[in-house]
Image (cartoon, coloured by chain):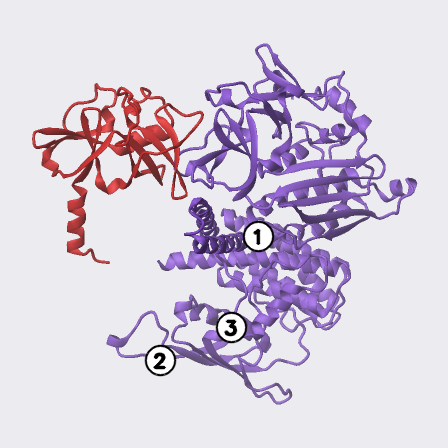
Chain colours: A red, B purple
Amino acid sequence: MQANPIESKEIAETADQYLTFLLGDGEYGVEILKVQEIKSWGPYTPLPNSPDYLLGVINLRGAIVPIIDLRKKFSLPVVEYKSTTAIIIVHVESDEQVRVVGLVVDLVSDVYHLSQDAIQDDVDLSASLHGSYIRGLGQIDNKMVILINLEPVIASSLEGLPEGALS
Amino acid sequence: MEDDDLEELKLMFLEECLENIELLEQGLMRMGEGDSSADTLNEVFRAAHSIKGGAASFGYQPMSELTHHMETLLDEMRAERRAVVESDVDLLFAGLDIVQTILEDSRSGDAGDHEKRLETQAKLEASVVNGSGADPAADSSGNTTATDTTEPVADVAPDWTLSFVPDREFLKRGNDPLLLLREVARLGPLEIKPDCTDLPAWADYDPALCYLQWSGELRGGVPEAEIREIFEWVEDDCKLDITAIPVPDTDVPAAIQTSAESPVSDAPAATGAPGKKPEKPAAAKEGAAKSGGGESSTIRIATDKIDQLINMVGELVITQSMLSRVGDSADPIDVQELRERLADLEHHTRDLQESVMQVRMLPISSAFSRLPRLVRDLSKKLDKDVELVMEGGTTELDKTVLERMVDPLVHLVRNSLDHGLETPDERTAANKSVTGVLELSARQESGNVIIEIKDDGRGINCEKILGKAREKGIVHPDDDLSDDQINQLIFAPGFSTAEQISDVSGRGVGMDVVRRNIVDLGGRVHVHSKFGTGTTVEIKLPLSLAILDGQLVRIAEQVFVIPILSIVETMELAQTEFTTLPGAGDVCRFRGVYLPTIDVAQQFELNAPEPARMVVIVETHKQRCGLLVDDILGQQQVVIKPLERNYKPVEGLAGATIMSDGAVALILDPNGFKQDTALSEAA
């Protein structure tokens, strides 16, 4: 099968796109190709014997999907869930298996196109606790977007490690 | 790509082999019981033949050699040239065992026991030669290659001219003309020439098609059947003419078209027939399918595809019940029509779900079928006279449950034979008939399958068991147990009362593993026994692993599901003797025994506004235990969804399910709790 040149160009373009969301004052972005859908906030079932940032599970059309409160995961101050609270459903490969996980965020913001040179990825964040979670810093109209590295965020959550064990 | 195809075909062959081995075994069992009807012999012969053919085409030389000899012996019997005698049946069994070993070895990649095979092979051969009584075969050279023939031939077989014209698509079906011709060459001196006239111009040449044909002469007096046999697997894919070269003093039939008679070689659908009966529905069905144009009545489907189907239907059921709720709450005048259609939808979805679940169900006879052999072998070994009676083989059970029940069943049957049933002398002394009876039965009962293994042996000696249990510290010296409670002690870990450890049973690792396997499947096991008259082991299993009958309970404002099958009893906490042992957790008294009690809310770190009111007594691996809950709600069938699909297994949970309102409810796993009370440590 030969790659369709137009198709692959489209993929290349989408690959540069990021869905951004707010957690407090900060704007964060995830690769749009890993986003499956966005769900409005609703009831969930808490899971026992799990870290506190793992809120519980929801029913996503019959699939049992765990949801992670990113504020708690990133040790940000906790706020009440409100009408703008949303769950971004992402799929990530972990343990050779595609897993579907929901990320609870304050507000879904926008979709940006960010070329590789607009991303600064040489910021030394190793000193910070969540360094490996951050893929780089994007610059959009004098605004900074923190681009998240989904895999380590999800992997560490699914292993159920308490935050801080990974550094 | 082609390698993958071959690999897949190989796997199919191995699967088919298993089916054929089963058929062979069942048939041999019947032969051992004195059934020498043509049907049985033919069936056994066909099974051996299919294994042989497949083994040869996939390069399992040892297997094909061995089955060849089995087949030769069977063929003799089939042709009524020799009687079916016990020693031959034993020999065939021995051969079958080796085929099975080779099969297992080839799956695991081991080399296998060569010597034993050769030995059995030689014995089979010897039996054919001695037993046949007729003149030894013309070319029986005594070595053990796949092609040597010991079949006595009445007439001197002539030489043959062969014409072999493969179809264009011959290669695409995974056939190799060269291999076939080589095989023919092993029968005798072969002169063969290819005919290349059909070869197209280079530009039009498609390497995937077969343009060649062959013709030649085979000498050495090979029986025609042997030549045909080589081509048997490809007879629909080629045109084969075998013509005798006239020999002055024999008259043999001239050219016979391959289509004239076609020996059945397909692997038949294996299940269905209860092992002990001589009439054979599966074989009959197979015959019908054959005459109906070679269509197969079964189809192989990967289990994960079926599971996906089951999942989707489960979703449909949930969506449907959500719609019903919406319909029920709407204005009745506006939505009369909607409600009726919703009722239809409900009906259809339930039917659909039932049918889809049915796909995974297999008759229990496929697990029972290997037991007659076991009983036959063991009773010989133990010098006991045993009659095995099996009932309810058509009772259906989920494939996974069935597969995982085989080992426990085998173990329980062994146990009955070894410990339960007495020797003929003992039985005569006890005024019983000399032949012990072992009854196996299966039946469906209110959404569960009940399997019973019943013997009329010596029964369980309660005194002895209790003494042993006290000695081993399983039971406290002061505890007073009912006979029924004592009987269940045989399932306790590390418990074995066999005075002598035999290689049949008695290492004390058995019964608790049996129990564990059953409990793992969400089932229960109970033993009833009367000293001197016999023992019955009753196993209760869920019909399926995908769906379970759940008891909904409320714990700290959250709804949880407890599998009904694991529930022994529910009680109000106020009515039980409930005590907290300092530093060792809670216990409650249930029917005279103190059981460890788990505060689920506390273990799950849930905020319970008020203390629990109810206790649910459940069966676990180790022992019974009590789960504290706030409230008992309704009962409901739920679809089990594993948490590890998107997360990971959680201690104390067997999975999750979706309720009719779309919310997720968690299913408790009674085996998953840490039983950290003093009682469970003692056990």
Q: Tell me which chain the residue with mark 1 is part of.
A: B
Q: Alpha-carbon neighbours of circle 1 within 10 Å: few (<14), some, or many (≥20)? A: some
Q: Which residue is mark 1?
A: B361
Mark 2 and mark 1: Cα distance apart in space: 53 Å
Quarter occupied by the C terminus of chain B: top right
Mark 3 and mark 1: Cα distance apart in space: 37 Å
Q: Which residue is mark 3?
A: B231
Image disc number at residue B467? none
Name the side, left or right, on which B587 lies relative to B188: right
- State which mark lies toward you, 3 or 1: 1
- Report the amino acid beneath label 2: Cys
Q: Residue at x 68, y 55 (%)?
A: B93
Q: Residue furthest front?
A: B333
Name the side, left or right, on which B222 lies relative to B183: right
Image disc number at residue B196? 2
Q: Position of residue B47 (x, y in %)?
A: 61, 63
Name the side, left or right, on which A136 lies relative to B219: left
Label 2 SS: loop
Q: Position of residue B221 (x, y in %)?
A: 59, 78
Indicate which disc, 3 or 1, sits on the residue closer to the N terminus. 3
Q: Is residue B563 visible?
A: yes
